[in-house]
Amino acid sequence: MKHLEAGVPVTKHTKKRVYWAITLALAATCAFFYRTVTCHSRTSASLYFGSRPQVRTSGITHVGYYDRAHRQTKYLGIPYAQPPTEERRFRPPLPISVPHNLSHAVIQANSFGPSCPQSTPVPYPISEDCLTLNVWVPDVPAPVTRSLGEEIAKGLPVLVWIYGGAFINGSTQKYPADALVEAAIDLKKPVIVASMNYRLGIFGFPVGAEPSASGAHNLGLLDQRLALEWIHKNIALFGGDPEKITIFGESAGSVSVGAQMSYQRGNTGGIFRAAIMQSGTPSTMSTSILSSRTRQTTYDRIAQHLGCPVSGEAGWRESFSCVQSANTNDLQRAEWQVLEIPDKLKATDPAPIAFAPSIYPNDPFFFDGPDRIAEKHQFANVPLIIGGTLDEGTDFVPSLEDTDTLRSYFTTTQPGLTFGVETPAARKAFDTFVSMYPDDPAAGSPFGTGNETWGKGRGTKRGAAIFGDWLFEAPRRKFTREAVKAGSPVWSYQYAQPGYWAPEFGVGHFADVQMIFRWFDTHSDPEMIRLSDTILGFWFVDAFESGTCALRDFFDRLNFVYYLDPTPRGSRLPYWPQYGSEALSLQLKIHNYTLITDDFRAEPIEWLMKEKQLYV
């Protein structure tokens, strides 16, 4: 982490330098260098010392930097928790604090902190000391500030991103918010964006009886909660309004949004007021939760790789203490080896796997099965945008030749691939489910592509449709309906615009994320820019222009962040009605938007929504 002692690293992995503010008295002589942050002068407590913006929180000064090219101030790599290392490994996070013998510290918040250890190599520094967050603050022109008036009198609205990655991969470094913040400025609805790292894999979601007995429960979700509390407490100092925080995430990040909504049975403490869920709900994790035997096998194999005793050889304390004291690299390598699967089972994305949130009786998030939590409406009743992509399952299935290979794939029970089909009752339910999908490539996913298989097995598109409906579409439709029943204002979307991926993926899982973070050439692809602007407009602002079609809707999220409605009264955007009893959903494409009824593939999805063997 970025340390709180000058020149004394907390871990050997960290390269950040932190300096104690021993010379704070010099600030008085340099007072004329201070000026208010330009993003929002009426509320921001950020100051400049010379040319460096800084924000002071609870005895710590965070020194960021002004990015003139992108018209924003960045505070990167801010530690929000004590390092979860050594004796703190496998323990709930503790808030960051200044050592008792010092009154103040300075942190150079000018670069991302290291990524948390994960299941595959990444091009970023890795360290267990990874619990940091980032804040991007827009430089708002005075005319925009005047035009918004009372809308930002208490500060700018705030978006908090939670990344996905199957709870085994992910990092804030992969999602710089520069383009998102700059687009919001151009759309005249500026927002502050924040993001956080959280623990992954065995470090954040250890599975098995031994971690359970030790109290190592859903640590990554606790990391997220602590970061959200830090943001709510301190965002006003950056010019944000703590009462206008919207959380959003995709895939495992969307599952996390749902989990944060269920915190203490929906008693979230008001640390966010709205949510956006992209491709995932807590019930998406049912396949992993149901894999109880596979999860215990996962822990035992990791312990064996580390030379630690396993169940039956020693008490749980001895076993878990041995794993807890293992070298970081050794533990990470053990995880990699245990999650390895045969090549014939490998797809583009690894999922579902054994590491994921688990159910514990006293857990603040998964105190019951996610399906039951949804049915009992034990989640925060907040305005919600929820949706996904047209072809959610195409990234996750390998080439499947026929029904036998398809069935074999979906009944796999390995640490690196497990669908929770571990009992005779679950196998019977799965066979019934599969029978609802015709053995015809033209009916499979990517949808609307006829008999084309791109050289893959005949059963591949059928398998992709099954995967997408099982893990994404049925959980999404059920959560959406339950949120409406609970009285939440809900807007639904389906992203249907093909991107830059190979055609065999169609509009695959993650395709909509490129529009939010602008992962395309903004100089040579004006159509994608228009689509991106539309999506951001729905989220943050009203950006309708003649000729800018359906994906304006996605950008109505800017409107949503400001007004809790993607198309508020007076909006120039195409009307996006609530989901309601008519189950209306907005389908988003370039040059086309369409209101559709959320009833596609009704037979299997309705059956899944009632099924108790494949969900918990």
Image (tube, rainbow, N blue to C red):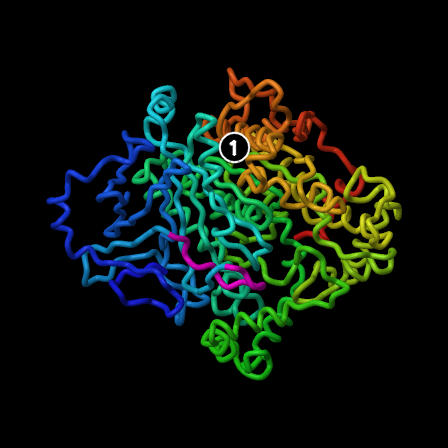
The spot of residue 526 in percent (x, y) is 59, 30
Q: Quadrant of the N terminus?
A: bottom left
Quadrant of the rendered image containing residue 397: bottom right
The spot of residue 255 in percent (x, y) is 57, 48
Examine the rendered structure and indicate whether residue 245 appears above or below residue 576.
below
The spot of residue 519 in percent (x, y) is 57, 42
Examine the rendered structure and indicate whether residue 62 appears above or below residue 382.
below
Specify the segment rendered in magenta. 111-123
Q: Nearer the viewer, residue 118 or 91?
A: 118
Quadrant of the rendered image containing residue 450: top right
Indicate left or right for 313 with 128 as reference.
right
Indicate left or right for 17 with 166 as reference.
left
Q: Which residue is depicted at the point 62% across and 47% down?
A: 372
Examine the rendered structure and indicate whether residue 155 appears above or below residue 464.
above
Q: Does the magenta run of residues contain 115?
A: yes
Say what secondary structure mark 1 lies in: loop
Q: Which residue is depicted at the point 44% across and 64% down?
A: 127
Indicate left or right for 522 with 10 as reference.
right
Q: Nearer the viewer, residue 555 or 616?
A: 555
Residue at which label 1 appears: 383
Q: Which residue is depicted at the point 49% across and 80% down?
A: 318
Indicate left or right for 606 with 179 as reference.
right
The spot of residue 320 in percent (x, y) is 50, 75
**Residue, far front:** 524
Dot 1: within a 10 Å radius of its alpha carbon, few (fewer than 14), some, or many (20 or more) residues? Answer: many
Q: Which residue is depicted at the point 69% across and 62% down?
A: 417
Q: Does the magenta run of residues contain 59?
A: no
Count how many numbered circles sit on residues in the image: 1
Q: Main secondary structure of the magenta part?
A: loop
- Residue kind at label 1, given as amino acid type: Pro
Examine the rendered structure and indicate whether residue 430 appears above or below residue 517.
below
Quadrant of the rendered image containing residue 314: bottom right
